[in-house]
Image (cartoon, rainbow, N blue to C red):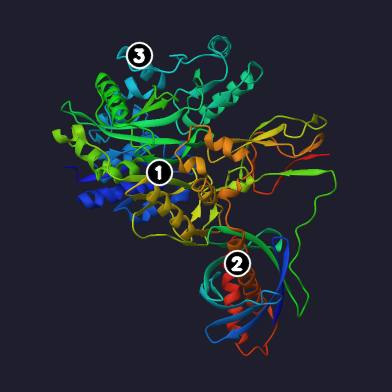
Amino acid sequence: MFKKILIANRGEIAVRILRACRELGIRSVAVFSEVDRKSLHVRLADEAYAIGPAPSRESYLRIDKLMDVARKAGCDAVHPGYGFLAENPALPRACSEAGVTFIGPPEEAMEALGSKTAGRQLARRVEVPTVPGTNDPTEEPQARALAQSIGYPVLLKAVAGGGGKGMRLVYSDAEFESAFRDAASEAMNAFGDGRLYLEKYLDRPRHIEIQILADAHGRVVSLGERECSVQRRHQKVIEEAPSPIVTPELRRKMSEAAVRLARAGGYVNAGTVEFLVDQNLNFYFLEVNTRLQVEHPVTEQVTGLDLVKLQIAIAAGHRLPFAWESITPRGHAMEVRLYAEDPENNFFPSPGKILSRHVPSGAGIRLDEGVYEGWTVPNDYDPLLSKLVAWGNSREETIARLRRTLDEYTITGIRTNAGLFRRILTEPEFLRGEIHTRWLDELLRRPRAAASAPQPSAVDDSKEAAAIAAAIWQAKQSAAQAPGPSSDREGASRWKLEGRREQLDRTP
Amino acid sequence: MKYEVRISGKTQMVELERRADGWQARIEGESGTTADVAEIAPNVFSVLLSGRSHEVYVTPSAGGQLQLQTSGLEFLAEVIDSRSWRGRRHGGAEAEGRQQITAPMPGKVVRLLVKAGDTVEAGQGLLVVEAMKMQNEIRSPKSGKVERVLVAEGQAVNAGEVLCVVG
């Protein structure tokens, strides 16, 4: 087993990985950019080293600096997390040159499956169905001709992409040119690779993915599916396992397809095979994510497995048990992604200092996060704050737990999208499991239905409580600002001190 | 002490009395609700409103307003001290017809889509600002003419900074 692991990431996933290391008795080494000196992953790691300025291209994406830290700190393995370099074959290559183990698939498997176009070519060879579109990166005039031939709407996607970046939905020929330019430029900025491909856009498809694990000895197992159909602008915001529509039969068929594809690509370690599922339960291969997913906790909650520890064990050459070839989910788990973004301002990122917060806990709740009170959310990275995961015996119990948890969750100083989840989790369609990848975008364009709005009497009560708190806050403020020795029996100097302290603590 | 609180379009008079470990509050008017209030942490108040338990987080925000969060609900309030009638300032009103387009958050201008003198439709893209790896198009709130563009491509901007003016 490894002695020391370099975590080439930041935020909640770096914290998630170092916790697994700690439980395994492996030392963890964090890296941080200039704006992350006070981040939670740095505070919790056994060792931490600076790797440069805030922009990720000068820090978290610098393989040379990471290898330097790995060598100097004496690491024997590197965990890439997700995002940043996690799907860049140059990292496993650099690792093998430096003589450290990369915790993830081999470089060749990453190339065979990780690139969306290569993955689709391989899928077609092993008879896994795919969505109509190009196999190869394509240039503007050819792409447009193809869009015309397969018919609008079409989806432009970054070859190197993920997380909705460098992706554009195009409804007509007139929009094509500008959409192509924007997507290419966004892809170039996010991944350093502006190449695009395109595919046909299906009608109200569901996004369902299969989590696989493959050891280095030829065993490939499926841990079942996650449904990630609730998306805003192609970004997943809620994930759950199992899917409300997947039958044991469909699970078996999708699992077999995922395992077949992983074998064909020589895959090792944890990976996810993403599919679109249409209204008739036909499934189409979308892409392989050759890494740990953001939403891996929902699979952990319904299987009882720790995927990060398994990634480490697989990288160390351990075998997967035979019995896992027929694993079935127990209970239901659901994750919401809390982002520092302002729902009232078109979900713009809302970085800033976290002034105070109340973190929920209790039965059936798990919180994976990389933030704390007093920390400033930097402007330079993905604004994911916390992943709130609930599990229960049934989908209904899980949703009730998430709703309860979101009522307890409070954060001040920055804006979050928590209100969006409070709304989604009361929408009748969501409760019935009638969702698809465009469901949330459509919901947000509709006025809020009365059924999902909070009770007016509860709002009035809360409003009165809020009014009282506002008055008291002002009373304290006025007392603190009163000039000279005051006749206030409470003692002006202490009020004043308190007021000054509070003002200093505040960010503009 | 009496305070006038303007909250979500409603005005409420709140009477406060300091107690040893908190406050006693009363809302004037037909409800006449009384509340027992304790400060849990700076800017966090536990309010027992006729026994019903609420926790309220107070954050001062732009324009002298207070942002109040409780049980997943959010309100904006303005408080006027009835002794001094020296209220908190209102946010400045927008000049009629003429709109200043400001950056909704810190970021970088990656592309200008219009120039001074251009005629724009409401909803038309004016410029693209990149923040946290996402490119966001800033759209015109109204139809009119672009009077000035105050930023250049590649320029870093702060939240609230004026980007351009549409008349």
User: Could you tell me which quadrant the C terminus of chain A lies in?
Assistant: bottom right
Same chain for marks 2 and 1?
Answer: yes
**x then y, percent, for residue A468:** 63, 72
Bin the neighbour count of mark 1 within 10 Å (Cα to Cα): few under 14, some 14-19, many 20 and up.
many
Judging by the rendered image, the residue that carries numbered circle 2 is A461
Q: Earlier in the sequence, mark 1 or mark 3?
A: 1
Q: Secondary structure at mark 1?
A: loop
Q: Is residue A438 above or below residue A409?
A: above
Nearer the observer, B72 or A271: B72
Say which amino acid is labelled 2: Asp
Same chain for marks 3 and 2?
Answer: yes
Q: Is residue A452 above or below residue B135?
A: below
Judging by the rendered image, the residue that carries numbered circle 3 is A124
Bin the neighbour count of mark 2 within 10 Å (Cα to Cα): few under 14, some 14-19, many 20 and up.
some
Question: Which residue is at 67% across, 88% downward?
Answer: A485
Q: Chain of mark 1?
A: A
In this rendering, the label closer to the viewer, 1 or 3: 3
Q: Earlier in the sequence, mark 3 or mark 2?
A: 3
Looking at the image, residue A12 sits to the left or right of residue B122; the answer is left
Q: Is residue A80 above or below residue A411?
A: above
Farthest residue, direction right: B96
Q: In this orientation, does residue A252 appear? A: yes
Question: Which residue is at 58% across, 43% downward?
Answer: A347
In this rendering, the label closer to the viewer, 3 or 2: 2
**x then y, percent, for residue A416:** 53, 51
Q: Quadrant of residue B2?
A: bottom right
Nearer the observer, B14 or A183: B14
Say which amino acid is labelled 3: Arg
**x then y, percent, for residue A283:** 38, 23
**x then y, percent, for residue A28:** 28, 49
Q: Chain of mark 2?
A: A
Q: Quadrant of residue B79?
A: bottom right
